[in-house]
Image (spheres, helix red, strand yellow):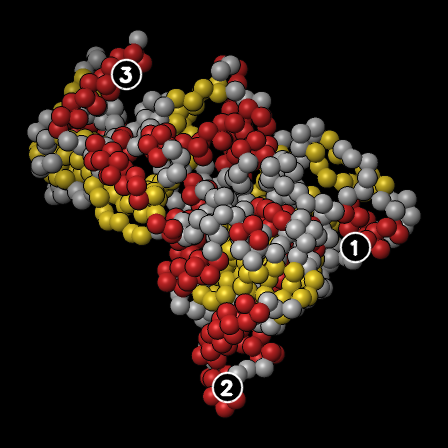
Amino acid sequence: MSSAPSRSCVRAAASVSSRPNTLIPNVFEARSGTWGLIYCPPQIAAEDNPDMQVSSPDKIRNLAVVGHSDTGKTTVIGSLLYTSGATNRLNRVDDGNAVTDFDQQEIDRKISINLSAAYAPWKQHKVNLIDCPGYAIFITETTSGLHAADAAMLCVNTASGIEVMTEKVWQITEELGLPVIFHLTKNDRERADPLATARALADRFSRNALPVQIAIGSEEGFSGIIDLVHEKALSYTRDGDGKGSVTEIPDDLQGAVEEWRTKLIEAVAESDEALMEKFFEEGTLSGEELISGLRAAIARRDLFPITLGSAEHGIGNADLLDALTDLAPSPFDRESFPAMNVGGDSTPVVADASGSASALVFKTLNDPFSGRISMMRVVSGTITADTAYWNTRKEDNERLGALHHIQGKQGDPADSLVCGDIGSVAKLKISNTGDTLCTKVSPVRLGWFEVSPPAISFAVEPKSKGDDEKIGEAIHRLEDEDIGLHASRDAQTGEFLLSGSGQLHVEIAVAKLKSRYKVDVILHPPKVPYRETIKVTADGHGRHKKQTGGRGQFADCKIVMEPLPRGDNFEFADEIFGGSIPQNYRPAVSKGIQEAAVNGYSTSFPVVDFKIRLIDGQYHDVDSSEMAFKIAGSMAFKDAMTRARPTLLEPVMQIEVVTPEEYMGDIMSDLSQRRGRPQGMDAGGNGSQIVKATVPLAEMLDYSQALTSMTQGRSSFTMAYSHYEEVPRQIQQKVIAEDKRDREEHAG
């Protein structure tokens, strides 16, 4: 660890002490597992950085930085931190020191995996930036970040155009009603065309997606920004501090500036009746009217500004920070935050700095050394350290310890977090991601979202038999951190299953098990979760009779078994009139049938989507019991299955493949061989195509590698569960034979 004080250390010293010779905790070193104490002279702290403890929500901006993978989101954040003075150098993904990519897997793979946050102090504002992953398999992390933000900064690679995650994130912002600021990245690259990309965004998403900045120069010659709102140009030194210097608007861009500024003024005027009247009277709007009208239109999702830059070289950073502080909504600009009261009724919460405190836990981090770190967004009131708050889901008190402003994996101490701010707290005992902390006298449950079910499962087992217990504890911590990950034990096979949104998702979790918790596991190929069902109605009879010298066992039941629609699982109807089976024994028949169904009939896969009608039976005053009727119920179930024409069901997935047009033929042919059914095609950005299809999960287990090989890595796909449907007869025989072989091996 460096002996020189970091700026985070300096900020921490400024905020916690004015005494000389103060030792404070510096950044936690995850690799070494040690805390360092660094001497931070208070005079350096005072001169180097102002205290970022904001006192009013109108000085806060909360942006979820989102977009497709490889649009440079993490680089944008790192570059803004450097320009704002939050860091003393430009931290880079390629150098493995990016502020918001600090997990070892992120460093090794050079991709964002976890949601993380940092803040940039800029002109008396605190700009909180939530770095969200760009891979579709981590969409849950991105959704979590959007729930904590007041706006999305949707990054688009100008050289690549609109991609699949651009559209997915846009859809989520529509559902949440979040404002969107488009930010065009990598404008210094070959084929970068920001104005063409701006037009594509307007065509795809909204005609009111309009540039508020245009580029000076193109591709390698990109050197500056023209701010259309303030009608000024800034020139940047390549690889400089990102602050730029005011310069003259080039003559050859005067026409473009006038054209796009006029469009911007007209759009702002159209969004407000008073501004429209002013525009009709005077033909334009004043600078102040343009800014205030633009900000209000953005907050209402009436207008979507487009900014641009090259974060890798620091070009446009100051313009972007100015745009975020001038135009992005503050927590006060947000109409309300969705919430429910204890009765389940909708009770939106407004940003009220003096109101009852409430905060949303939107991310949990787990470190084997420092423990749990919970990131929270304060929605109303003020959250203070060393105070107990009410967890409305757990219905219990949670005492908060020390609070921190978040700077990647570092924490700058804070006595309190005001309404609208984002911060963290360590070692919460009962609170998890998605929970609300509030005052007990005014309990609310802040809006969260339903996590999509996992798309794929793998069986995991420890390489060392003694690690069984360690696996469970380590995976529990990973689930706590990654709410898209799910672990369970298969009731049929006893296997421990790890499920996620894709193969890479699960592989990364396994890598974390090894690197963080020293648990080495074997990952088996995923098993397809087939199901059995029936096709016709059938009668069943179960008679259990056993005499053993003393009290015997007797139960007799007659049932009718009927198919149910897909997804209805199981239904039981008691249709006995009279006392052929006493009332207290009838639930045992249902229980016996359900237990038998779990173990399957033709296979080991559970039987689903059927109804049982209990119509008759017999009992004995002495020998009948609940256990006897459970056994009779299972016998009746098996008897009915012999005539109900059992069949196999398989999970079918909805997939979207984004590919250059030249690979369309190969992809369509491959999907057809995988029993895929085309659902349509859409045009993507820069000539790409989006292929939509439904494909059985059994055919998709190796698709990631196959697609990479087929298209030289230029295509990507997303997959989500769609429905179950019947397996073709010829494939059923194969599946049944394989299942029988597996059961015999397991029994042996």
The image position of residue 670, as x and y in percent, is: 25, 33
Q: Quadrant of residue 669?
A: top left
**Which residue is disc 2 drawn over?**
283
Assign the N terminus to one quadrant of the image.
top right
Please rate how many residues cluster around mark 1, counting C-alpha atoms within 10 Å: few if below 14, some from 14 to 19, many from 20: some
The amino acid beneath tag 3 is: Asp
Res 2 visible: yes
Q: Is residue 627 left or right of residue 218?
A: left
The image position of residue 309, as x and y in percent, is: 57, 55
User: Marks 2 and 1: which is nearer the front?
Assistant: 2
Residue at the image position 78 percent from the left and 58 percent from the top: 50
Q: Is residue 453 left or right of residue 475?
A: left
Sequence-first tag of 3 and 2: 2
Q: Quadrant of residue 652?
A: top left
**Which residue is disc 1 drawn over?**
49
The image position of residue 542, as x and y in percent, is: 14, 26
Label disc, if present, on residue 742 of the rendered structure:
3
Q: Whole-Å distance between the Cαs marked 1 and 3?
A: 65 Å
